[in-house]
Amino acid sequence: MSTIFIVIPILFLLMFDLGLTLKWEDFKLIARQPRAVLVGEVGQLLVLPVIAFALAWVMRLEPVMFVGVVLIACCPGGSSSNVFSMLARGDVALSVTLTALSSILTLITVPIVLALAVNVSGANVTHVIHLPVGNLLVQNLVLMFVPIVLGVLVHRWWPTAANRIERVLSRIAFPALMLLAGVFFAQNWQAIVANFGQLGLCVSLLILSAIGVAWCLSRLSHLDERRSRTIVIEVGMQNAAQAIAIASSPFIFNNDTMAIPAILYALVMNVVLLTYVGVLRRH
């Protein structure tokens, strides 16, 4: 079974679930807390990809893995970040706003960052990777923007039903991602094992650096503890399902190997952020 037939419905449901949680008040938060929103989006859309470029370059990753590491870094925040923010006693409204905003903004930023990654990695010279920008834009619109809008409309017209659906989807989101990771590992275990050492170190440094920089940006911006915790989680948590969908899609890269960094990042990300939340709750 091709991974793409699993990841597409999972990604669609995750984005639909995000739309179900959105209210007009969430977007008003941009005007009420512009500094917190700006810090979160700068960390998510600018700082994290820059760190990924630097690590991939210093570690001299092969072109496919280079692009794969940048791919997971330039994707929007993961939908589970809202739950993590709640567990960390962060600002859940800010978390929802940042996730929604990054999911929309990355429709523009992902093609730009990936085009740069393909050129810098040298993949375009060796003809290892070709980036069909038009297909990427269309797929992201269909799998990211459309389900968010559908979720928002359902919440607006049928709020009671939306709340019931959201409760169910929020419970199956994490198991669905783990299923995807399990299927992907079973199909690509040899490539994962072969690249685990270097890539494992790379994605671990990526998420730890992202968390450290996000915390520093938050404190330098004089944000309070709740908002700082939320921004750390938002910058560190990435939408691995989208990265896998882009890498394995027959309409874009059609390369399962490129999705390996996203799988490893998802595993490390959950371990690191669950540890972070656990420490916060203990203290």
Image: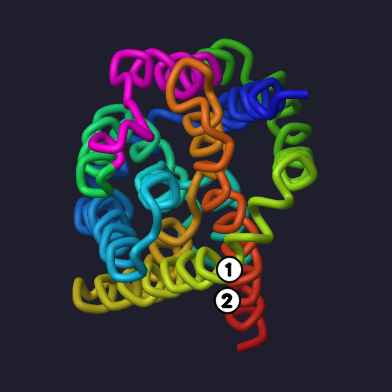
Q: Is residue 26 above or below residue 273?
A: above
Q: Which mark is residue 276?
A: 2
Q: Could you tell me what secondary structure mostly forms the magenta stretch?
A: helix
Instruction: Give the residue displayed 69% in from the left and 31% down from the top.
Output: 166
Using a 10 Å C-alpha cutoff, classify the residue at mark 2 as few (fewer than 14 neighbours), some (14 to 19) or many (20 or more): some
| 134 magenta-colored | yes
Instruction: Give the residue displayed 74% in from the left and 35% down from the top.
Output: 167
SS at mark 1?
Answer: helix
Quadrant of the frame with the N terminus: top right
Q: CA distance from mark 2 to mark 1?
A: 5 Å
Left or right: 172 in relation to 35: right
Can I make out residue 21 in this image? no
Question: What segment is highlighted magenta in the picture?
Answer: 123-152
Report if the CB atoms under discs 2 and 1 are less than 8 Å apart.
yes
Residue 178 in the image, given as x and y percentages of width and height: 75, 47
Residue 114 in the image, given as x and y percentages of width and height: 29, 38
